[in-house]
Image: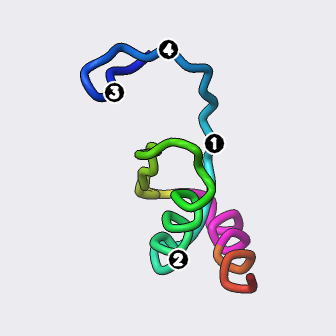
Amino acid sequence: MYQWKGKIVQEKEAMLVLKTTRSRYRKLEQKIKQLHPYEVPEVIAIPLICGSSQYIEWVTKEVVNR
């Protein structure tokens, strides 16, 4: 439930978490906006404070190789 253009709207929504690197964020944001049906979809970046070095290396490798 949210307010949009002065009206209360109730929609079914799902949260999607995508992982990328800082340098590829803008490209991902543009693609989401292109594909999403909402006029203003929620696209946010959550900074990675720390994590398993093996996991971070894997994500970085997978993103860079695409």
Q: Which residue is mark 1?
A: 16
Q: In the image, residue 13 lies at what x, y percent?
A: 60, 27
Q: Residues within 10 Å of mark 2 (few under 14, many from 20)?
A: few
Q: Which residue is mark 3?
A: 4
Q: Which residue is mark 2?
A: 24
Give the main secondary structure, helix, strand or loop, of the magenta stretch.
helix
Earlier sequence position, callout 2 versus callout 3: 3
Camera-side residue of 34 and 58: 34
Instruction: Name the residue rendered at 33%, 27% in the picture.
Output: 4
Q: Looking at the image, is mark 3 or mark 1 nearer the viewer?
A: 3
Q: Secondary structure at mark 1?
A: loop
Q: In the image, residue 34 lies at what x, y percent?
A: 56, 61
Q: Which residue is mark 4?
A: 10
The N terminus lies in quadrant? top left
Q: Secondary structure at mark 4?
A: loop
In the image, what residue type sits under mark 2? Arg
Q: Secondary structure at mark 3?
A: strand
